Amino acid sequence: MSMRLFELMLWAAGKTVLLSAVSIMIGFAIGLMVCAAKLSPNKLLSIPGRLYVSLFRGVPLLVQLLLIYNLLPALGIMVPSVVAAIAGLSLCTAAYQAENLRGGFQSVPRGLLEAADMVGMSPWKQLTRIRAPIAFRLTLPALVNEAILILKASSLVSVVGVIELTRMAQNLSASSFRPLLFYSVAGGIYLVICWTIAGGGSLAERMLKTEGRA
Amino acid sequence: QDSLERVKSAGVLSVGTETAFAPFDFIDETGTHAGLNVDLFEEIGKEMGVEIKWVELPWEGVFPGLEAGQFDMVAGPATITKARMERYRFLTPIAEATVAILKKAGDDSIEKPEDIAGKLVGAGKATAQLAQVQEFGKTLPEPIETREYVGYNEAYADLAAGRIAAVANSLPNIAYLAQQQPEVFATVLPPFGLKTYFGYIGTKKPEDQSLLDAVNAALMKIKEDGRLAKLQEKWFGQSFETPDEVTDPNV
Amino acid sequence: MTRSAVTVRDVHKSFGKTEVLKGIDLSVPQGSTTCLLGPSGSGKSTLLRCIAFLEETTSGTIEINGQPLGFAETGDGKRTRLPQSDIRKVRSRIGMVFQQFNLWPHMTALGNVTEALVTVRGMKRKEANAIGEAQLARVGLDDRGHHYPSELSGGQQQRVAIARALALEPDILLFDEPTSSLDPELTGEVLNVMRELAGGGMTMIVVTHEIGFAASVGEKIVFLDEGKLLLDGPPSEIFGTPRHPRLQQFLETYLDRGAATLV
Amino acid sequence: MTRSAVTVRDVHKSFGKTEVLKGIDLSVPQGSTTCLLGPSGSGKSTLLRCIAFLEETTSGTIEINGQPLGFAETGDGKRTRLPQSDIRKVRSRIGMVFQQFNLWPHMTALGNVTEALVTVRGMKRKEANAIGEAQLARVGLDDRGHHYPSELSGGQQQRVAIARALALEPDILLFDEPTSSLDPELTGEVLNVMRELAGGGMTMIVVTHEIGFAASVGEKIVFLDEGKLLLDGPPSEIFGTPRHPRLQQFLETYLDRGAATLV
Amino acid sequence: MSIDFGLIFARMPEILAAFWVTVWIWIVSNVLAVFLGFGVATLRRYGPLWLDLLLRLLVEIIRGTPFLVQLFLLYFGGPFIGLSLDPIPAGLLGMTVYSTAYYSEIFRAGYNAIPVGHIEAAECVGLTRGQIIRRILVPEMTMLVLPQCVNMAILMMKETAILSIITVPELTLVVGAIGSQQYAFVEAMLLLALFYWFLVELSGFLGRIAEARLSKFRFAHS
Ligand SMILES: Nc1ncnc2c1ncn2[C@@H]1O[C@H](COP(=O)(O)OP(=O)(O)OP(=O)(O)O)[C@@H](O)[C@H]1O
Ligand SMILES: Nc1ncnc2c1ncn2[C@@H]1O[C@H](COP(=O)(O)OP(=O)(O)OP(=O)(O)O)[C@@H](O)[C@H]1O
Ligand SMILES: [Mg+2]
Ligand SMILES: [Mg+2]
């Protein structure tokens, strides 16, 4: 494999990382809203929240991507490839992150909130000062896990016309006819990225650890 | 809005294709998108005074994308068939698409197309080539078995891995592949079955017709002044006689 | 000082169908220490939580320094919920120290103590820190301000919780079994701090199983049983003979452990 | 009956670099009750766990009914680990009751009690059930055999744990703070069962913070401090005046709680 | 664009056959993976250190690369090292290996979540190591890890769609092919979505029932 092709693979890997990172972040924001909706006592919010999670977790990402890319234009909404890819990944990961966050929020011990009540904190302050920071620490491992899953799942976004790492491997093997080589290289690159994320995750966990335990 | 006006005013014609379909579209050793389509559309662009914007996606995403209006037309190209013509508009053929057999280099058991009798043959799922080889198989003394792949590259990989005896695909594609990888693959001549052609595709939406007419006119011009034949020589090692328009395809 | 800091009038509290408090009347004079005793499940914690308005009573009223907490009686015997801001205002007179400490794990000891000063009272960080350090010093933890709860022993955590409550200068402190999750030596630490507070004139209501502490520090002992207030009086009267038979039975489980054989 | 049930000779135990037990010698006569007291971290649990061979000692020997447990001394002062089957055999003479009960949550009370009878002793289910029921009756739980641990109160769980240990008819029972996670009334239940066992001639070693219980039931009191055995004798001697200064300091934290003011 | 399911419904028998292929590969590979995953976790816990490290490396490699890439290497690369498998066996093997890695991590966490005291209690009454694993660890673990296993099974259900690249005639391949033959792409995708959603919801529902039945084995509050 020539240097040039290896560079191409790395460039595609960069795209993979970028797509995943952006999607994880957007997904986190959406996930937060879905989680809030699901936890809401108002049925008008909680039922759509539940439905969202059920649908986006229940349908394979591949199918979601194709539907976003091809069904929305039929309704008059044009979606460029990259937007469709990010939308698909974000909407999907949002469902998983919403569930993680819900778990985190619900595991914040009630007593900590009662203590906040007793010193007179408003509900908003309780959320921003107590609930969210603690829930975030509790969800961090799940978040890292989700980042790795989305990184791997991003191998599917080629169906909406984005050339990321796996697609690049497919393309290059099609023209050079050395599929095993290119797939192995792609696998190796994925591995390096995954291990980097996992390493960063445990580092962050360790940094937050002294504070994390009660 | 009329598509031609839109394309002209934007100065960009966007074309959907799969870049894993050598020699029409592929990524070369230097990592650039190359192939007959790239050269031919460059000429078309010159004729029409627009730039070409490539949208690259896997084949299963191409037609849904076209219907959804993600791009103006599809390069591909695709084999011109009756069924497809009902749904899409094909432009003038750019190459012959008659089916031939690809075998593993050094496989003496297949010398002519009929030798695939009783063997396992691969082809892309829902392709015209699959239908052709299945028809051809019925004429043989022993029936053939077919295996359908999501893409031709998986079929080639499986042929190299030795799981299937042959792959049925259009002659230009397999000839190019055998030429690139002579130690792995070989073409079995002659092609068989009914004569078919490759063409570029657009929709039948009324607003698209003026644009497709313009592209077709550009293509005809390129064909008439011999540029197309030269490109065919460059990419296939030979040129093809193609009709100006296919009105009643064989399949 | 006979003004009442906490007045509980005919308070009932049900969870679903089970009535846990069955009409409690109680008056806690300002500056006094009241100890709540009673067998497990008798409703001690529930009563304390009602006084802190962490639970809403089913009926009855609770007044803090003469002001109604949570609900206001309307003339016809019904009651309306007061606005949240009123509730927060009245409740700001009360501090609560929980059995499980409930320190916020992501803040240092000092952070725990100053959090409300900054976010609720709107103080400057610096000002708040000065107060926080003073309060920590008061409970003997001047050198532990920058430790996270997980780095403190149980007794130290409990004292941080007390400092947190004290920082807001409440009139009334509520304690729910403040020592039951501590080991004997740590228990001593915390009881000493409480003894000092009692000496300093703080109004305190303490749910406790430490009979000895109750007997020596409580100016008033309240014995709850099955959601009813069975006994209410000074320790000499409550613990003195003849004892109420239910109390006697309750105390036996302690005496039986032979704590007395030592002396 | 002066034969020794448990003999501990110069036992040292280190975790990594910290030495937790610094040469313990102890002899527990058959049929007696020995109570282990000491401040937190002094090594009480570690010693008990060494006796049950849940921890391996770093040096020194432990004998159960005269048989070495875990290691055999070879002539030259070194020692070799005995085969696993020997260890199991000697250990089968010992029953242990944990502070956290450690009942198996997927088995009923009866299942917990009979498990070892069936899998270790190879008894028939029916036979084992008969024994199990008898043991549960002995701790007052004849009607709770078919409940899962999660359906039992803390005191009931602790008594199931005792029945589980008793079912194997051990010669020696070890208890690690058997009541410290129980509330006062449940504590009474469990101490009563233990008192009965002590009366019935079982050899028991009990780590406890219940000074009263130790004083009244222990025939021998052992006071550990910083990994050393500081005091060892009958309660009258240990608790009687003049007291050892370290013990006095330790006891003060209890006395300070005023437990004595009641009587 | 009009939506017309008629074209696709005409091919229902084929679709149901593919549905069945998806379901049985999913079930068989997951059942195998649960047992193998338990085996891997057990070997890692009780086996020698080198085996633990080796298995850990393998698990990390499998969890760190997309299933698509693994499957491709297994199916198209296998023959070059003498492992030439037909699509269905290859798919089954790929799914099983991939899921085993994940299940083994669930069981490893399960082992660690069982309070040490429960094991010590068993040692004290004389159970052997084998008996402890069989009688205490396995049943306790079952109830600890059940929710995660259900979750995992659902994730794997969706991974079966990737088997299409090695020509396993499963749901995505067949419905996709029918869609492109009939030029009913969107209809095909909607139908696919519906099928998978149904399967996922069904598994979630069954999982919840199983959990409810096991709920009385919760850890006692201690
Ligand atoms: N949120 C609740 N829902 C239903 N029942 C409750 C709730 N909280 C408490 N109870 C019940 O109310 C009764 C009194 O509980 P409470 O916690 O006040 O008892 P307590 O006197 O504090 O006991 P302990 O000494 O064990 O803490 C108990 O029977 C308990 O089961
Ligand atoms: N597994 C271990 N690794 C390292 N240190 C340990 C371990 N187990 C116990 N220790 C240390 O050994 C010392 C004695 O512990 P041990 O549990 O025996 O004390 P204890 O007397 O039972 O105290 P407590 O009354 O608090 O239960 C402590 O300082 C403890 O931190
Ligand atoms: Mg309580
Ligand atoms: Mg201990």
Image (cartoon, coloured by chain):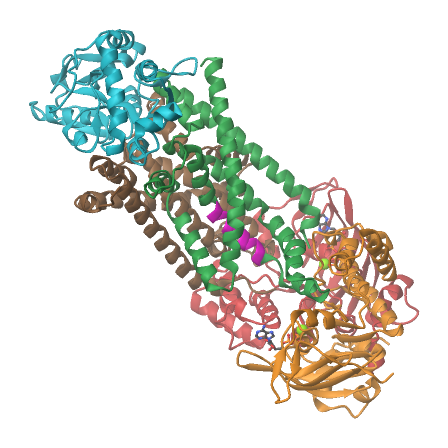
Chain colours: A green, B cyan, C orange, D red, E brown
Ligand 3 in which quarter: bottom right
Q: Is residue C18 visible?
A: yes
**Quarter of the figure with residue B250:** top left
The image position of residue D184, as x and y in percent, is 69, 75
Q: Is residue A105 magenta?
A: yes
Relative placement, left or right, of C133 versus E34 is right
Give the residue at x 53% y 67%: D150
The image position of residue A110, as x and y in percent, is 62, 63
| Rendered view: C174 above or below E218 | below
**Magenta residues, start to end:** A94-106
> For the stretch drawn in magenta, what is the main secondary structure?
helix
Q: Is residue A73 magenta?
A: no
**Quarter of the figure with residue C129:** bottom right
The image position of residue A147, as x and y in percent, is 52, 39
Relative placement, left or right, of C52 versus C143 is left
Quadrant assignment for the C terminus of chain A: bottom right
Quadrant assignment for the N terminus of chain A: top left
Q: Nearer the viewer, residue D60 or C84?
A: C84
Q: Nearer the viewer, residue A213 or A117?
A: A117
The image position of residue D18, as x and y in percent, is 77, 45
In the orientation shown, which residue stands out farthest toward the bottom?
C242
